[in-house]
Amino acid sequence: MENAVYLDHNATTPVRPEAAEAAAAALALTGNPSSVHRFGRVARRLVEDARERVALLVGSAPADVVFTGGGSEANSLAVRGTNRRRVLVSAVEHVSVLSAADSVELIPVDRSGLIDLDALEEMLGVDGPPALVSVMMVNNETGVIQPVGTVADIARKHGALVHCDAVQAAGKVSIEMPSLGAHMLTLSAHKLGGPSGCGVLITTPEGAPQPQIRGGGQERGRRAGSENLAGIAGFGAAAEIAATLPDAERIGGLRDDMERMVCESATGATVFGSDAPRVGNTSCVMMPGVASETQVIALDLAGIAVSAGSACSSGKVTRSHVLKAMGVDDEAASGAIRVSLGWTTTGRDVMRFVDAWKSLHARSGVSHMAEAPAA
């Protein structure tokens, strides 16, 4: 859309040209990667090349990479496929993790959105069957980075498996799966510049889950179904770029400038999670007295796309479970929006957003009411 400003990269980021080119080349091929003839072998080589690139992104072995239909499927495979009766997840996890098991035990977080490690230790210390612990690396709403390595150390002492949803981390921070200590890790192509409809679950021998989609022997029997050749090819190309963190420093500077200008312009404006380690592209900012839905609509009319939280809520603007878990009261949470930058974001985009945000705040009259003397 001409002159539109896209600041919802955590929902999906534009496909990088290299990924689009790789996907288009794959679409031009004829052949099933499971076929043994020449056409099939060419397709198989494309899949395995992409598998190697994705593995390099997180420091794992290619044989541990399982391609899926997306990040949500990979999360479900991790949570359900381990067959662990106890599933402990942080209270700020993505809904695809929170809803993957029939019942989960929520690990609390502090006001910054960081997991309560003492509470995790206490929960795992209770007698019971071996548990699965699922803690995301980067929160999709606030950008807060969780101490996954410490979580894994605690979990291992109690014989628990560890799953890490790293969907929002890839391309923003360095990921080294061996040092994280996780048994399973989830990625999604369209969050790092690849096509939609393709994800991976990266496993270790100790944490390899049982398949949830059964049929053929694809993905070494861990996920049945003919591979999404174009999606996988694009994923591989995007992963190779993401491994270099090409835009992280630039985007972080733009995000910091944006938050400073917004907070200077409105008394009471708050950035949630700003006192915790965060990735550089994400800001969860509250405009006092103006509902998040109103902000999203008004900014959209001004040609600027942001969101009111996770994109996985069927287009609805609902109360953020992330902010609720952080202890944010209803009034403050109702005025929060998520602004997420990406590889296409420019300084001009940020200024367009800041100007539109300030204009909306001024029209709301909240600042004037706040400054009026008491009667």
Image (cartoon, grey):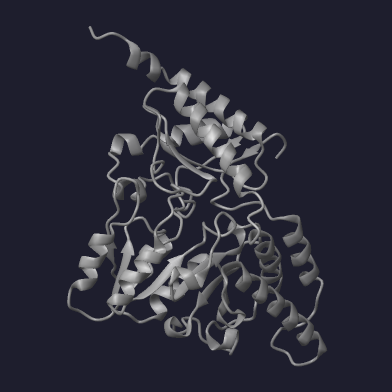
The residue at the far left in this view is: 127
Residue 78 sits above or below residue 9 on the image: below
Residue in view at x 47 percent, y 70 percent: 179
Q: Residue at x 28, y 69 (%)?
A: 103
Residue 256 visible in image: yes
Badge count: 0
| Residue 74 seen in this snapshot | no
Q: Is residue 292 left or right of residue 257?
A: left
282 shown above or below 358: below
Residue 34, quarter of the rendered image:
bottom right
Residue 345 on image: x %, y %: 65, 41
Give me the residue at 55% from left, 32% from top: 257
Residue 63 spot, x, y in % from top left = 59, 83
Q: Position of residue 239 (x, y in %)?
A: 65, 64
In the picture shown, does residue 186 fall above or below 340?
below
Q: Quadrant of the N terminus?
A: top right
**What's the residue at 53%, 46% (across, down)?**
280
Instruction: Tell me where residue 52 sits by quadrant.
Output: bottom right
Residue 7 position in % (x across, y down): 58, 41
Does residue 17 appear left or right of residue 158 in this picture? right
Above-or-below relation of 248 to 196? above
Q: Nearer the viewer, residue 193 or 1?
A: 193
Q: Quadrant of the rendered structure where residue 148 is? A: bottom left
Nearer to us in this view, 59 or 222: 59
Quadrant showing the C terminus: top left
> In the image, is 259 to the left or to the right of 217?
left
